[in-house]
Amino acid sequence: MGLSDYLTLDGVAANMHARCKREALSQLAKRAADLTGLSAETIENALMDREGLGSTGVGNGVAVPHGKIADLTEIVALMAKLDAPVDFDSLDDKPVDIIFVLLAPADATAAHLKALAKASRLLRNEDVRSAIRGADTREAIFAIATETAKPDAA
């Protein structure tokens, strides 16, 4: 499975404006609500609950917030490139400008971990991060993410 199994063009935001981590996650929760039919509040609460366990800011300007939601029927991903970095309490203490959200059904443990691993591998690649940062449209960001992370891609 590739990221395109979870990430759709409607789940991508280019040059999204947020002043802080909470605002970024709130905006992404609203977008996820449109995609899933679940309430934005439920999604935001799941993401913030996970942040309460420790920051999902993994370093190099990237965050991978994720959560499990009981009423979700399939794994859903969202991706945003921010117009300016925000503090995310990241492991390297650097602000974040690329956010990849992963939402999974409560019982999707193995699939959730595989999807997280795939997103992490993609965003560890400096060339991919640079390409995303240089992209000005959601179409370009979507193409970078899905073409680079195809199941047969290295």
Image (cartoon, rainbow, N blue to C red):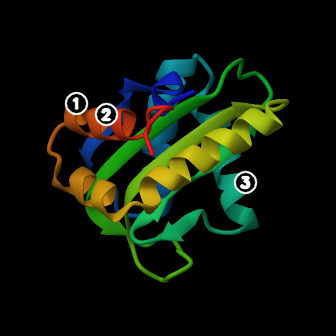
Residue at (31% x, 67% y) in the render = 85
First in sequence: mark 1 vs mark 3: 3
Check contact, mark 1 vs mark 2: CB within 8 A: yes
Q: Which mark is residue 111?
A: none
Q: Which residue is mark 1?
A: 139
Crowd tier of the residue under label 2, counting other residues whose Cα lies within 10 Å: few below 14, some 14–19, many 20 or above:
many
Q: Position of residue 79 (x, y in %)?
A: 41, 42
Which three-letter amino acid code belongs to the residue tagged 2? Phe
> What residue type is disc 3 on?
Asp
Q: Residue at x 30, y 50 (%)?
A: 81
Residue 13 quadrant: top left
N-terminal-most mark, 3 or 2: 3
Instruction: Quadrant for the N terminus, please.
Output: top right
Residue named by callout 2: 142
What separation in Å lies between label 3 and label 2 (alpha carbons)?
A: 27 Å
In the image, taking residue 39 as reference, residue 95 lies left or right, namely left
Task: Give the residue displayed 45% in from the left and 50% down from the top.
Answer: 122
Q: Secondary structure at mark 2?
A: helix
Viewer can see residue 150: yes
Q: Are marks 3 and 2 in contact (CB under 8 Å)?
A: no
SS for tag 1?
helix
Residue of label 3: 49
Query: In this rendering, which labeled residue sits more in front, label 1 or label 3?
Result: 1
- Quadrant assignment, res 56: bottom right
Picture coordinates of residue 20 (x, y %)? Answer: 42, 64
Q: Are marks 1 and 3 in contact (CB under 8 Å)?
A: no
